[in-house]
Image (cartoon, grey):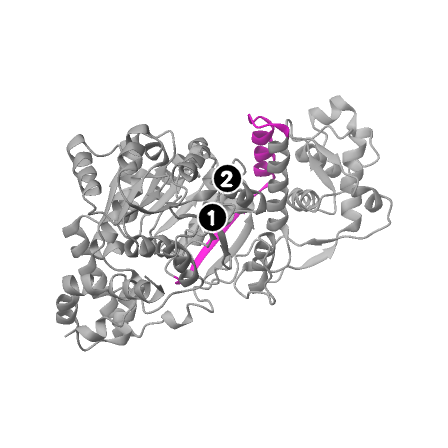
Amino acid sequence: MDINTAKSVLQNTFGYADFRHQQAKIISELIQGNDVFTLMPTGGGKSLCYQIPAIVRDGVGIVVSPLIALMKDQVDALNLQGVKAEFLNSSQDYEEQNRVEQLIKSGNVDLLYVAPERLLSDYFLSLIDNITIALFAFDEAHCVSQWGHDFRPEYQQLSIISHRYPHTPKIALTATADMRTRDEIVQVLNLNAAKVFVHSFDRPNIQYRISEQKNSKEQLLKFINAEHNNDAGIVYCLSRKSVETTAQWLCEHGKIALPYHAGLANHVKDNNQQRFLREDGIIIVATIAFGMGIDKPDVRFVAHLNLPKSIEAYYQETGRAGRDGMPANTWLAYGMRDVIKLKQMNSQSNGNEQFKFITQRKIDALLGYCEVSDCRRQVLLNYFGETLAQPCGNCDNCLNPPVTWDGTAAARKALSTVYRTGQRFGVGHQIDVLLGKTTAKITNLNHQLLSTFGIGNEHTAAEWQTVFRQLISMGYLAVEMDHGALKLTEKSRPLLKGECAIQLKVQKYSKAKPTRKSKQASDSHLSAQEEAIFEQLKQQRALWAKERNVPSFVVFHDATLMDIAKLNPKNAEQLLDINGIGKTKLELYGAKIMALLN
């Protein structure tokens, strides 16, 4: 067995002309029986890295996946490509599970998807003890780590696999992990001898955009109406209540928006997820309980109405947009309430002090990313240890460079007010003092007698909000976790003493220049005639998907249909040259596509 055999599978089964990025090296290592750890962004082709070796090697490839709700679609997609794939999970009845087990025993399965809980059961381990195993693939491997943003305790027990099957190759895959998380993945899965492959984190087709919360639902609706009317998208909220009110509000304004959070009944969550996967133009409004492992390639936007918990979480969640490589947008609205809420959640968590400290550092890093004036993509990639030589030209700061001003005097007034109020109050009270408001609270505390009372009338309350937020993000102020009180940091001392100056961003409420194009996706433009063919193909694909009871993208990705429309193949042989069409799909749909084109 060599890489040429793997390339034949790539072309004939999956319909791709050549390997991308580091796929060939990863696949080669696994075929040779070596362990691998790979960090590859969403949409980078991670699945092929274990699917092809599992097909090429003797035995069954066991894929450990955290979400059973997605296994059926993954298996349906593989079956449509002629791959012998199955899954075992609690959604199946006894007869169906028994059928799959008999196929496993007889050696008629190339890929088997299981959840970690089932894999670790004595019954399942006894079952696979007596068969040939091609490999183990641990998908969404960041779940292994307590430092990952979606900690799953059962993943911590997976070390048993390395000890029980020491000679079976293993691959751990994740789209995002900092160095601490990577180290823990390697340690827990006992992959110390594994070859490590870290692909570029850059997703050039995604545009990054961040706004200050003003009226977040109205801002979101304007964003969707202006650039993503009738597109599929995901909207993330911090709380279950916010999820439900936002989904209802979007529906009232003409959108098809479905809620998703852990408090909903399982049948409601499953139905909403399936509608999102199978229908066009559906918007899911969700907490972070939604999204891990979602394979839908044509999500055109991801919006956050609140701050995520870390840059890792932000990167993973925004990465669900544009998996097909086509242009996609991400938009985040945030304010000081989000910062305080996240800090309070961290303070009240059950984690130990080290965990809380690390979590706080992650929140601070995300806040700094939100407030940065430079290219967002450069900052994002730098966080993951990667350098981008030139500004990307496809983020809000590149498209509309922020205007800065000398904020030294304003910053000193803000810091002085925090000091003179005893470092015991939040942003709202500090602003009331600066603006000289005689509220009951100020009167009761005699804060109208402070030297900073009323010295900030040259700025509005909204402008002072941005000043305080930037001072926090730049490390001049810290937020006390329990009550949101502002405290001076050591860094504030030279600024208060007049020993240094500070530049602050002018908050602009106009939207960033909308763009649906990017360097990587500029060739996706279709002529009017090609667009008409593309729409016909999409309608036909929807019928084929309905016949098989699978999502449309399982039949063909949009990118494949666009290539058909642009290249206008004259025969079945030319169809095989199009990415995403292998021999099995050609047999199923080749004649029908040619009939439609002709």
The residue lying toward the viewer, choosing from 251 and 489, is 489
Choose top left, top right, bottom left or bottom right for residue 427: top right
* Residue occupying image coordinates x 47% and y 42%: 142
Q: Amino acid at mark 1?
A: Gln
User: What residue do we see at 60% from left, 41% from top?
Assistant: 363
Whole-percent x, y for residue 349 in the image: 56, 27
User: Which region of the structure is painted magenta?
Assistant: 325-353
Residue position marked by numbered label 2 in the rendering: 149
Quarter of the picture containing the N terminus is bottom left
Q: Could you say where residue 8 lies in the image, as x and y percent from the top left?
A: 28, 66
Could you tell me which secondary element the residue under label 2 belongs to? loop
Which residue is labeled 1 in the image?
Answer: 316
Count residues near mark 2 (Cα–Cα under 10 Å), then give few for <14, some for 14-19, many for 20+. many
- Distance between the Cα atoms at labels 2 and 1? 9 Å
Labels 2 and 1: the sequence-earlier one = 2
The amino acid at mark 2 is His
Q: Is residue 244 left or right of residue 427?
A: left
The answer to whether marks 2 and 1 mark residues whose Cβ atoms lie closer than 8 Å is yes
